[in-house]
Image: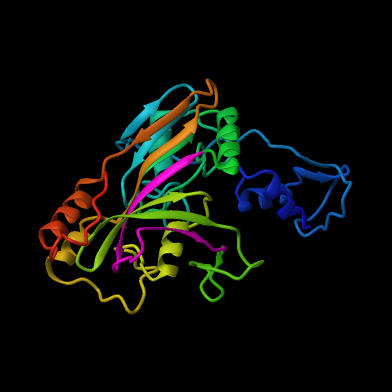
Amino acid sequence: MRLDRFLATRLPELSRSRIQALIGERHVQVDGASRKASHRLRGGEAVSVELPAPRPLELAPEPIPLDVAYEDEALLVVNKPAGMVAHPGPGHERGTLVHALLARCPSLSGIGGVRRPGIVHRLDKGTSGLLVVAKTDQAHLELARQLKARTVSRRYLALVHGRVPQEAGVIEAAIGRHPHDRLRMAVRPAGQGRAALTQFRVLERFEGFTLLEARLRTGRTHQIRVHLAHLGFPVAGDPVYRRRSVRPPEGELAGRLAALGGLALHAAALGFDHPQSRERCEFEAPLPPPFAALLDWLRRHRRGDAGAARGML
């Protein structure tokens, strides 16, 4: 196995780019010698990784208001609005969640690197809802371990195009980079992607739309969006994975979708074991007002409620 892939399996708390940087900066050794990322391990070697102290952050804290659901000395749980990017990257050098976090608590975990302090897991820019942020390296490592062990519970609400026929289902399909568009993800054949599993159930049906509850059992990039689009039911408001067969909304519906400021996808509930006390922590976040208003509008314009499957929101 390649050295970089081996480290990705053993250190899930580190991003692929972070692993590549550590190897390139000679913080990784195989039997006492620095190796390239492509070095092939044969078995029996001793692989050591040094996590250097984080360099002084070059990011300027920004006093952006945050909706904090919980905070203590180890972590924060934040209700991120749609439209906010989690951390800096190309085209997003300011106004990210990280900038806001640094203004609130300058001391964050450095495991994610200089540009991702405290970030244990992400939500897409267009997705609203709950995510946990680590203040200490110990909290970061423990939360990452729970993510790998799949003991972190994550429940999403998604409004999708089309009428989903089954009441519930499981989508188990590997996800990897799209073969022709590196900015997109796609369901890939076995061996060309990473295992991904999403559970869903229907909460309510509307004219041309279905409200789903989705639960993540893995955490791949764009997982819910890719899996639901693969089924033929892309998330409303998603320009990346919307199928050509889906007609763009018009009139008032188009305006209400635009008012979301992102996708009709909300991380509504998050649960994990506290990294210090080991007590189970459960959090919920209500739907953003534009999302709730869109559902109310769809209910008023529904043609007959006989086929609607009501659910708790």
Q: Report the side of 121 relative to 104 (left or right).
A: right
In depth, the one of 91 and 257 nearer the eye is: 257
Q: Is residue 159 magenta?
A: yes
**Residue at x 54% of width, y 63% of height:** 173
Is residue 313 at all visible to an observer of this figure?
no
Q: Quadrant of the N terminus?
A: bottom right
Single out the residue that lies furthest toward the left.
300
Residue extending furthest toward the front: 306
**Residue 192 horizontal side relative to residue 229, left or right:** right
Q: Position of residue 180 (x, y in %)?
A: 54, 76
Q: Residue at x 15, y 53 (%)?
A: 296
Q: Position of residue 183 (x, y in %)?
A: 49, 67
Q: Position of residue 3 (x, y in %)?
A: 77, 53
Q: Foreground: 161 or 15?
A: 161
The residue under the point 67% across, 43% down is 11
Above or below for 134 versus 262 = above
Count the marks: how many? 0
Horizontal side of residue 3 vs 172, given as left or right? right
Where residue 273 appears, as percent x and y from the top left, is 51, 29
- The answer, for residue 88, to whether it is visible in the render is yes
* Quadrant in the picture for the C terminus: top left
Q: Which residues lie in the magenta part? A: 152-174
| Coloring basis for residues | rainbow
The residue positioned farthest toward the bottom in the image shown = 245
The quarter of the displayed image where residue 175 is located? bottom right
